[in-house]
Image (tube, rainbow, N blue to C red):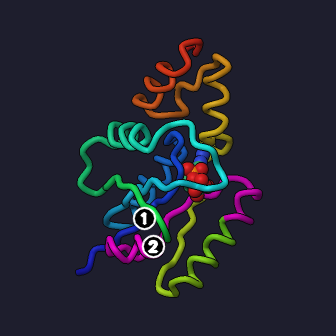
Amino acid sequence: MTKKVAVCPGSFDPITNGHLDIVYRGLCVFDKVIIAVGHNPLKKDFFTTEEKLEMIKKSVGDNPRIDVDVFEGLLVDYLQAVGACAILRGLRVVSDFEMELQLALMNRRLCSKVETFFLMTDYNHLFVSSTIVKATAAAGGSVEGLVPGPVLDKLRENFPKMTK
Ligand code: ADP
């Protein structure tokens, strides 16, 4: 039987427990999930792509059903190149919806075979975003429990004022 592969694309600047929750729940439906780090031109990245990849790889460990990669250019081209049939995204608040709808429709217009699957965030991660995590850490606050251990270590390295 053909393996169902989904790509979970994002900036992951840095990856949070909200992102990871979407990836692991995606594995209940798909045989494999590829976490694909891309550059969002609407956002200014804090971490380099290499740093993001390192944090993600350390966070997911050795799981044969999860791949970590980088993509450039059109996401639909990347999906075809890696043999994936679906895009996996997470939805938090209503304000996520508008942009996600536009992206999903544009991707479908670019390639009608590609479907986007949305998973609702878990209530524990409803307010968690990479942006709020960085802002809190930069101001010296604790983000323990919101990000995986390797990300916490990297944030502590960058923001020594962090409380825990
Ligand atoms: P992008 O810049 O492409 O939106 P992000 O890394 O910010 O990349 O987000 C990637 C995906 O993860 C998006 O679909 C976003 O809605 C989702 N996501 C981010 N944070 C959470 C969270 N706390 N819970 C669920 N989904 C999330």
Residue 124 in sight from this viewpoint: no
| Image quarter (top left, top right, bottom left or bottom right) of the N terminus | bottom left
Residue positioned most to the bottom: 112
Secondary structure of residue under mark 2 = strand
Q: Residues within 10 Å of mark 1 (few under 14, many from 20)?
A: many
Amino acid type at image mark 2: Ala
Q: Is residue 44 above or below residue 10?
A: above
Image label count: 2
Task: Determine if the C-beta at disc 1 is less than 8 A from ligand 1.
Answer: no
Which of the marked residues, 1 or 2, is nearer the chain's N terminus? 1
Compare residues 74 and 83 and report the one nearer the observer.
74
Seen at 50% across and 19% down, the residue is: 156
Q: Which residue does the image show at 67% across and 29% down from the upper left?
A: 135
Q: Nearer the viewer, residue 142 or 70?
A: 70
* Numbered disc 1: secondary structure: strand
Q: Is residue 94 magenta?
A: yes
* Vertical position of residue 144 compared to residue 44: above or below: above
Callout 2 environment at 10 Å: few (<14), some (14 to 19), or many (20+)?
A: many
Mark 2 lies on residue: 86
Q: Any mark on residue 158, and which? A: none
Task: Find the magenta span and give its range.
Answer: 75-99
Is the CB–ligand 1 distance for label 2 below 8 Å?
Answer: no
Q: Is residue 128 visible?
A: yes
Q: Position of residue 30 (x, y in %)?
A: 37, 67
Q: Which residue is mark 1?
A: 7
Q: Amino acid at mark 1?
A: Val
Residue nearest the viewer, comparing 73 with 16: 73
Asked if residue 118 lies left or right of residue 94, the reply is: left
- Label 1 close to label 2 by CB (< 8 Å): yes
